[in-house]
Image (cartoon, grey):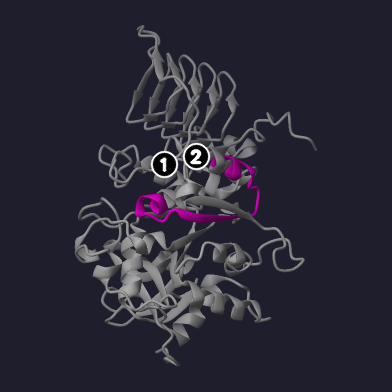
């Protein structure tokens, strides 16, 4: 059990501790209110970590960062975290970028420029740029925030949300902040239960009856189950709330430690758990619009997980409801005409069943089933596509057959091509996962003709 060395919960200088009601500007308690925007959210800075390599997504991240990978027919992965911020009333946002970030930066400019600096709102891109020393890259997640403390301090926040930019979920950060203040916490970690066999990929924690974190173990080989349910473990979502002054102290301490890997999960969070007031907060209490269903949170870090999460959206009543206009997912997409389905002959008919088809797409005498077609796609006559994801501007020639494929942006599938039918043949040209999902990229097709070598 962790030993408390000193009470370190701090309120912003010059301010008394806020009750939940004060934090909500006089409204009812946060756990009875589904959503609010308050002075508390306005005084918060969100730091989104979007610099990971995303190498487990194979060719999908050859030329883009993982948060910039398209998802859900029209979005990018990072849009979900940023939409949570905006919908929660947290509208001062920094995005730390690093690897292969140009398409991500372009998307942030196009999709998120509506935040109005005149109203104290902004989204600021924070690339690795030798802020502290001659090390060009961020050395870890904690170092990414540490190197930008000067910029964060300019916003004079009372609280800092540290968020991952590569997860799919909907969360009201306002209620998370209110719980943090009510407990007089130094650190609050959003948590979720995951099956025990998956827990080794996450930070696993143990908590007491008051949800005070007693232990935190980052990606343990043998995760400890929850005492009341041996089939699951309590894990971190990579969503943290810090008091600003406390965060500065902890990041400076970590930066001065030559033995640290400068990572939140490996270094900063375990230290805070041992010495300060650190609490876990159940995602089920701050999720949005899921009723009595299990909380929806997905790490789409592998091709199989990415395919499954997209396929989930094709269900009649998907767990993640993109049609809930009370919590919209904001994004940018080009101005394109509506999707078009042409030909209604006995020999060829343009149809889509149990599918999502984005604007600018043309289904010309082809059949698609349980498929997600992003904008600008064109599927020609007599082709059949099943259980697949086609990213923007994919062209499929005549008489093709695709099954359980992920086809990257801009690919041209030649006439008569079959993919997903013969796994042995597919492995000669493409990447096939253990579960039989086939990834197709322009490089694999020999179509990256404009890339300088």
Left or right of 234? Residue 122 is right
Please identify the quarter of the rendering in which residue 426 is found. Answer: top right
Left or right of 218? Residue 427 is right
Q: Residues within 10 Å of mark 1 (few under 14, many from 20)?
A: some
Q: Identify the residue under disc 2.
A: 111
The relative height of residue 277 versus residue 94 in the rendered view (above or below) is: below
Return the x and y of residue 253 as percentages of the image width and height. 60, 81
Contact, mark 1 vs mark 2 (Cβ under 8 Å): yes
Q: Quadrant of the C terminus?
A: top right
The relative height of residue 273 versus residue 188 in the rendered view (above or below) is: below
- Please report the bounds of the magenta region as a residue range: 84-107
Magenta stretch: includes residue 130: no
Return the x and y of residue 425 as percentages of the image width and height. 59, 35
Q: Label 2's element? A: helix
The relative height of residue 397 versus residue 375 in the rendered view (above or below) is: above
Q: Residues within 10 Å of mark 2 (few under 14, many from 20)?
A: some
Return the x and y of residue 327 as percentages of the image width and height. 31, 46
* Of the pair 405 and 22, the residue shown nearer to us: 22
Q: Is residue 267 visible?
A: no
The residue lying at 41 percent from left, 45 percent from top is: 308
* Mark seen at residue 330: 1
Q: Quadrant of the N terminus?
A: bottom left
The residue lying at 51 percent from left, 71 percent from top is: 265
Q: Label 1's element? A: loop
The residue lying furthest to the right in this view is 453
* Of the pair 261 and 57, the residue shown nearer to us: 261
C-alpha span from label 1 to label 2: 8 Å
Q: Is residue 103 visible?
A: yes
Return the x and y of residue 439 as percentages of the image width and height. 55, 39
The residue lying at 20 percent from left, 55 percent from top is: 292
């Amino acid at each position: 059990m962790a030993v408390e060395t000193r009470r370190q919960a701090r309120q912003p200088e010059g301010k008394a501790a806020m009750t939940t009601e004060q934090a909500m500007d006089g409204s009812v308690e946060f756990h009875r209110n589904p959503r609010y925007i308050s002075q508390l959210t306005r005084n918060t800075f969100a730091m989104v970590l979007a610099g990971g390599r995303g190498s487990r997504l194979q060719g999908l991240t050859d030329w883009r960062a993982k948060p910039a990978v398209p998802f859900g027919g029209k979005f990018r992965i990072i849009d979900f975290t940023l939409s949570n911020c905006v919908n929660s009333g947290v509208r001062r946002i920094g995005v730390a970028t690093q690897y292969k970030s140009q398409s991500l930066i372009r998307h942030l400019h196009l999709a998120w420029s509506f935040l109005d600096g005149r109203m104290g709102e902004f989204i600021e891109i924070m690339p690795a740029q030798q802020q502290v020393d001659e090390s060009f890259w961020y050395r870890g997640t904690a170092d990414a925030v540490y190197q930008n403390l000067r910029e964060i301090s300019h916003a004079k926040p009372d609280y800092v949300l540290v968020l991952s930019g590569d997860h799919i979920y909907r969360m009201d950060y306002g209620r998370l902040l209110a719980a943090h203040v009510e407990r007089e916490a130094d650190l609050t970690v959003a948590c979720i239960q995951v099956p025990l066999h998956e827990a080794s990929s996450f930070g696993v924690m143990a908590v007491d009856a008051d949800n005070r974190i007693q232990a935190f173990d980052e990606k343990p080989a043998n995760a400890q189950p929850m005492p009341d349910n041996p089939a699951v473990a309590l894990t971190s979502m990579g969503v943290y709330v810090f008091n600003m002054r406390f965060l500065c102290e902890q990041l400076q301490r970590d930066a001065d430690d030559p033995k640290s890997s400068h990572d939140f999960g490996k270094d900063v969070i375990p230290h805070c758990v041992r010495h300060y007031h650190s609490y876990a907060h159940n995602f089920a209490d701050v999720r949005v619009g899921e009723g009595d269903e299990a909380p929806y949170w997905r790490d789409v870090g592998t091709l199989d997980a990415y395919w499954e999460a997209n396929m989930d959206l094709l269900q009649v009543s998907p767990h993640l409801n993109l049609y809930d206009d009370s919590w919209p997912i904001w994004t940018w997409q080009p101005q394109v005409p509506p999707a078009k389905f042409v030909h209604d002959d006995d020999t060829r008919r343009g149809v889509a069943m149990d599918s999502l088809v984005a604007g600018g797409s043309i289904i010309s005498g082809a059949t698609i089933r349980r498929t997600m077609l992003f904008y600008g796609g064109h599927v020609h006559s007599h082709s059949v596509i099943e259980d697949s994801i086609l990213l923007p501007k994919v062209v499929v020639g005549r008489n093709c057959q695709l099954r359980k494929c992920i086809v990257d942006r801009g690919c041209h599938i030649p006439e008569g091509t079959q993919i997903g039918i013969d796994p042995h043949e597919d492995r000669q040209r493409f990447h096939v996962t253990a579960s039989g999902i086939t990834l197709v990229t322009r490089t694999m097709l020999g179509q990256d003709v404009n890339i300088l070598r």
